[in-house]
């Protein structure tokens, strides 16, 4: 496990090459630095969970991996394509191998569930409508919504909307599936169902999955490896066991749910001891 200022995560896979590489990524808004020299490798077929407190830069990093926004400096490579510098047409081709499930689900309220899921197929393929309808039913069935295709988003529970968002994300059979806070706003039982769905998708489709979350129970259940962010810097990257056993003080604070004031008091106490 890495615990340096800006570690580059490396691990071995069948082909030894990362499907996503983040190199020296910096994101600034005015004078505020959101990401500060982030380096991260994500391997094909693994589930990488990006964790950290509010404002740590998790969602900002995910948006750069998606190619939705460019970093202030640095590079993001997806399948060998530098999406920070590639022409728009090439970036759009890369986006077609990605499925994205947003925190808010981002469903169109004026469309039925079936039409929401079918939208990527209608926009990006030349498939016959009958084939699109068949594929839509298959995707809805895979997320447990086979009987809900004619409902509108307003008629769905929060958990059903999350599942619908996943169905739309996998409509194009992506190689890479990205989740932004999949359990946010859900009760523990429904959140556990979403975790189970992520595990099922990984088992069934062998896709690379990147999940941004601050939910510890979900993270340790679904992750192969975890990346811990704080104030825009990576504190550590490692397996769930490596992160769980970490002695890094800020990781321990996060995992043990120690408030900043308590952590500060501990730091002051340690400083006093070292001055004796």
Image (cartoon, rainbow, N blue to C red):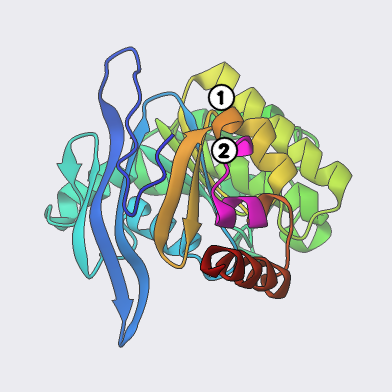
Where residue 130 appears, as percent x and y from the top left, is 53, 31
Between 104 and 5, the residue placed more toward the observer is 5
Between 53 and 168, the residue placed more toward the observer is 53
Q: Count neighbours of disc 2 (C-alpha within 10 A) and say few if under 14, some if 14 to 19, many if 20 or more.
A: many
Look at the numbered disc 1 and give the secondary structure of its residue: helix
Between 181 and 145, the residue placed more toward the observer is 181
Direction from residue 236 to residue 22 in the image, left or right:
left
User: Which label's residue is closer to the chain start, 2 or 1?
Assistant: 1
- Magenta span includes 244: yes
- Magenta span includes 260: no
Where residue 231 appears, as percent x and y from the top left, is 46, 68
Residues at circles 2 and 1 in contact by the CB criterion of under 8 Å: no
Direction from residue 162 to residue 21 in the image, left or right:
left
Could you tell me if residue 269 is visible in this image?
Answer: yes
Direction from residue 205 to residue 70 in the image, left or right:
left
The residue depicted at 52 percent of the width and 69 percent of the height is 275
Magenta stretch prevailing secondary structure? helix
Between 158 and 136, the residue placed more toward the observer is 158
First to last magenta residue range: 243-253
Residue that label 2 marks:
243
Q: Quadrant of the C terminus?
A: bottom right
Could you tell me if residue 113 is visible in this image?
Answer: no
Residue that label 1 marks:
202
Where residue 228 appears, as percent x and y from the top left, is 50, 50
Q: Nearer the viewer, mark 2 or mark 1?
A: 2
Direction from residue 177 to residue 262 in the image, left or right:
right
The residue depicted at 58 percent of the width and 44 percent of the height is 247
The residue depicted at 30 percent of the width and 87 percent of the height is 30
Q: Is residue 68 above or below residue 76?
A: below
Where residue 56 appears, as percent x and y from the top left, is 50, 65
């Amino acid at each position: 496990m890495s615990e340096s200022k800006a570690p580059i995560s490396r691990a071995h896979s069948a082909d030894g090459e990362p499907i996503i590489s983040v190199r020296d990524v910096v994101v600034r808004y005015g004078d505020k630095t959101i990401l500060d020299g982030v380096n991260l490798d994500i391997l094909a077929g693994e589930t990488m969970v990006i964790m950290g407190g509010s404002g740590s830069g998790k969602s900002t990093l995910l948006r750069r991996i998606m190619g939705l926004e460019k970093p202030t400096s640095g590079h993001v490579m997806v399948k060998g394509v530098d999406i920070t510098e590639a022409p728009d047409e090439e970036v759009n081709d890369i986006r077609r191998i990605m499925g994205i499930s947003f925190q808010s689900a981002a469903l169109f309220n004026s469309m039925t569930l079936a039409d929401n899921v079918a939208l990527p197929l209608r926009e990006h393929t030349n498939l016959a409508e009958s084939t699109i309808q068949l594929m839509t039913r298959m995707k809805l069935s895979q997320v447990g919504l086979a009987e809900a295709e004619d409902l509108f988003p307003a008629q769905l529970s929060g958990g059903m909307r999350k599942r619908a968002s996943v169905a739309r994300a996998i409509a194009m059979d992506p190689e890479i599936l990205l989740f932004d806070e999949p359990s946010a706003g859900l009760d523990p039982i429904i959140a556990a169902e979403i975790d189970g769905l992520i595990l099922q998708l990984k088992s069934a489709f062998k896709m690379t999955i990147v999940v941004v979350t601050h939910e510890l129970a979900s993270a340790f259940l679904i992750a192969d490896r975890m990346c811990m962010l704080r104030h825009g810097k990576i504190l550590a990257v490692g397996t769930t066991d490596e992160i769980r056993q970490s002695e890094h003080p800020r990781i321990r604070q996060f995992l043990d749910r120690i408030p900043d004031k308590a952590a500060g008091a501990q730091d002051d106490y340690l400083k006093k001891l070292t001055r004796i």
